[in-house]
Amino acid sequence: SAGSEVLSKWKELGVNRISLGVQSFQKKHLQNLDRQHDPDEARDAIRKIKEANFENWSLDLIYGLPGQTLEEWQQDLEISLSLDPPHLSFYNLILHPGHPVTAKANEAATPDSEEIQSEMFLYACEKLERSGLQVYELSNASILSRESRHNLLYWQGGEWIGMGMSGSSYFKGHYFHNPRIWQVYMNTWDHVPGEFPLNRKKAGRQARLLDVVMLRLRTQQGLSFSDLEVFFKHGPTESFTLLLHDLRNHGYTRPYDDRVSLTPKGWLVHSEVTTRILECLLKEDSLRPDLPDYVSDPGSQKRSMKTLK
């Protein structure tokens, strides 16, 4: 079939990982998302991926869909796990202003919608771990050695180059973005070698610290104290230690002595924990940040679902 031929060509070209955006195995939810495939097509695609001997592939799901119940989410997880994916991503639906899905979600919202989404997330973490997948980041789980190296690069503060239109890059301590308009993008590199053709913004100390704290806390490995010594040249202060003690007492962090690693309950309030930690770290520092009440998360957890006690 055409799909099998494409997979064979990809393999010949050196493609070694496939991420499949299934989102849901229930037709009504796919229709709400305006997706063109149906559950049977998703299963067929997975079968072809396996037949093509791609050992490294990922299945993506979305929870918090308009009108989605906890039971329906549990069914999606059961079906997904029955297909033995080496990697599974589970994202909370992001509601963009003016998008049709946003209107549908608002219409279907109930007073307990946020609480149900929290239950969906916690259930997924527990179910995936019991099924042999490690939840190594707040939206990703995998079997041993099948973590997404691409995403881990971001979370661990590595460098990357964005190649396409609007692609963002972080390289040699600078952020820069490719043009959004096709013709401008095509002409960008006409005079290379020469002066660098894009505007670069140097990553300041506060921006780098925000990235380190926010992105490391997304991962199960967490934020190590050695990560922070790069900025402060000293170990944990008394106020920082007291904050960590409080977070641990409320079940938000795991019992590690050399790092801050959030539990699934802690991931639910990832943004607020990030803000609290940054405020504590910089309380006596000369470079006070202008921290927002809500620290934006570049990944899939769109908000803190509960308030820290």
Image (tube, grey):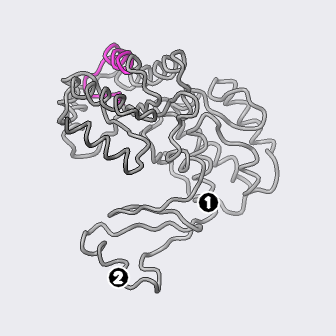
280 horizontally vs 42: left or right:
right
Query: Which mark's residue is nearer the viewer, 1 or 2?
Result: 2
**For mark 1, what is the residue?**
206
Which residue lies at the image location 47% right of the left edge and 48% below the top edge?
296
Q: Amino acid at mark 1?
A: Gln
Q: Position of residue 70 (x, y in %)?
A: 35, 16
Q: Earlier in the sequence, mark 1 or mark 2?
A: 2
**In the foreground, 244 or 53:** 53
**Which amino acid type is marked by label 2?**
Asp
* Snapshot quadrant of residue 162: bottom left
Inter-mark Cα distance, 1 to 2 = 35 Å
Q: Are marks 1 and 2 in contact (CB under 8 Å)?
A: no
Residue closer to the observer: 287 or 200? 200
Q: How many numbered circles does the render carry?
A: 2
Residue occupying the point 25% across, 69% down:
182
| Crowding at mark 1 (Cα within 10 Å: few <14, some 14-19, many 20+) | some
Q: Is residue 66 magenta?
A: yes
Q: Nearer the viewer, residue 2 or 143?
A: 2
- The image shows residue 176, relative to residue 73, as above or below, that is below
Q: Quadrant of the N terminus?
A: top left
Position of residue 124 measured from the top left corner of the image (x, y, whole percent): 46, 21
156 on left or right of 28: right
Q: Residue 144: image x %, image y %?
A: 58, 29
Label 2 CA crowd tier, 10 Å (few <14, some 14–19, many 20+): few
The residue that mark 2 highlights is 190
| Quarter of image, res 262 | top right
Q: Residue at x 53, y 27 (%)?
A: 143
Asked whether residue 183 is drawn in magenta, I would say no
Range of residues picked out in magenta: 61-80
Q: Position of residue 309 (x, y in %)?
A: 59, 28
Helix, strand or loop at disc 1?
A: helix
